[in-house]
Image (spheres, rainbow, N blue to C red):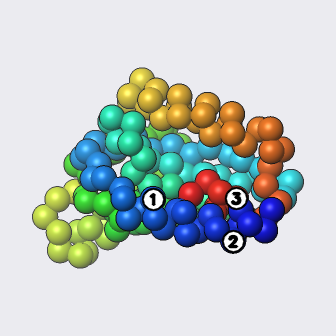
Amino acid sequence: MYVTVHYSPFIADEANKRKQSVAGSWRMDEIHIKVKGQWTYLYLAIDKYGSTVDFMLSEHRDEVAATAFFKQAVDHNELASKVVIDKKGANNAGSENINILIFLAGLLGFIDMLKVKYLNNIIEQDHRFIKKITKPMMGFKTFHSASATLA
């Protein structure tokens, strides 16, 4: 157990160094997983080809968490031209907040947010892979180990 938690951040850093650029059209969603018997939320974004844009583990599914995820994704990648989100209010509010931050930063473009259910099918299929990995583990013991292992 200790070995996984100890070395996972290093493996994740190496993977991020080798990360390729992603397309300008993203799909964003969240999935719930158990950490220490409590439900937590894994925010995930992939591009239109299925490459991972970014992810973030959060204890809450609200506007603050969605905004933090969008900010992290934009900071680690180029600015997306459009993002497909589901119809949850928190994701919509988070996307509006990131567009306000882009405006305040003086950037010329905005992220176009689309709420088209069938365009998110590719990310919904990606959830099956994550559940397949995490279900036999019956959840994670700590938030840190969950974040490091998922990275």
Q: Position of residue 101 (x, y in %)?
A: 32, 70
Q: Position of residue 92 (x, y in %)?
A: 44, 50
| Residue at 54%, 63% in the rendered image | 11
Marks 3/1: CA–CA distance: 17 Å
| Residue at 35%, 42% in the rendered image | 47
CB within 8 Å, label 3 to label 1: no
Q: Is 105 in front, or is 13?
A: 13
The residue beneath circle 1 is: 15
- Circle nearer the N terminus (2, 1): 2
- Is 8 left, or right, of 98 in this rendering? right
Label 1: element kind:
helix
| Residue at 31%, 60% in the rendered image | 77
Three-letter amino acid code at the position of disc 3: Ala
- Looking at the image, the residue that sits furthest to the right is 37
- Circle nearer the N terminus (3, 1): 1
The residue beneath circle 2 is: 6
Residue 146 is tagged as 3
